[in-house]
Image: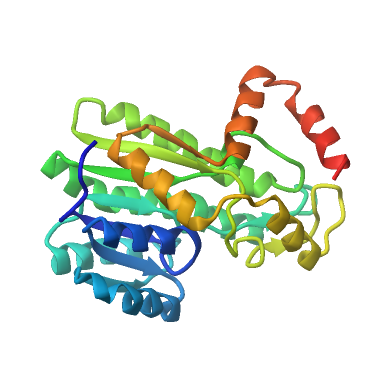
Amino acid sequence: MQTLAGKVAVITGAGSGIGRALAQLLAEEGCDLALADINGANLQSIADELSRHGRRISCHALDVADRAAVYAFADDVLHQHGSAYLIINNAGVAVSQRIAELSYSDFEWIMGINFWGVVHGTKAFLPHLLQNNAGHIVNVSSIFGIISLPSQGAYNASKFAVRGFTEALRQELCSSKVVACCVHPGGIKTNIARAARFYQGINGQCDADRAAADFDKLARTTPEQAARVIVDGIKAKHPRILIGNDARLLDWIQRLLPAAYPKLLAKLLQKK
């Protein structure tokens, strides 16, 4: 397995959840860090926490949906750090609403962050990686980029798009030493559910607090465990990283029963 010590890692959504855990782990691995998040206070908190590792850390308040801002961010990272090796497009949000009632503004909001944020981060840094003929682009999708559920149409669309985009990119990079991988977390104990826009749940009704509490019960994997799986996958150059037994099980069900899995999942959800 390759070492990441001395490399520059770029992480979006670094202020909380998986992004924060990745920053902590990669600092321990000896990486210099360029951390981006829309919440500047969270960024400063993680930077202060990681200062003990003696690595170079830069913080960047960033809306990944803003293409010009992401390109300016890439220029700033290369200016401050001299290079970038590991690009982790992790920033993400959620919307829970059935498609018939889903507003275009909510659809555009989630696609701007979850999908276009990945595209912006990839294209802004890809020329640099190709010039160096080295590095990794790590795009965070979801188990909902593999299976779909009612009320998750917008989230599914954004995460399936990340998967398709990354798999095409991987094939295009096969003659280079730049690696593209797609990450599919299952239930991770983060704040994404509490920060989501909830309107309707899987069963047609939704109380935001209850939905967040139900998510907490289903989320079995900690951000720290997820970060370790991702970093180990990067080192091993895995093209596809599934996180959690739930993600592995649902991936297996989808492969075995691609047409019938929605009925099976509906029965399982009715029992909860």
Q: Residue furthest top?
A: 256
**Rendered location of residue 161, percent (x, y):** 51, 40
Quarter of the image with the N terminus is top left
Quadrant of the rendered structure where residue 192 is?
Answer: bottom right
Q: Report if residue 13 is visible in the image.
A: no
Quadrant of the rendered structure where residue 175 is?
Answer: top left
**Rendered location of residue 211, percent (x, y):** 77, 59
Q: How many marks?
A: 0
**Residue drawn at (69%, 44%) of the image:** 153
**Residue drawn at (44%, 69%) of the image:** 15
**Residue drawn at (37%, 79%) of the image:** 44
Q: Is residue 117 above or below residue 175?
A: below
Q: Is residue 184 above or below residue 8?
A: above
**Rendered location of residue 112, percent (x, y):** 51, 57
Quarter of the image with the C terminus is top right
Q: Is residue 80 above or below residue 98?
A: below
**Residue drawn at (26%, 76%) of the image:** 51
Q: Report if residue 190 is visible in the image.
A: yes
User: 156 or 233: nearer the eye?
Assistant: 233
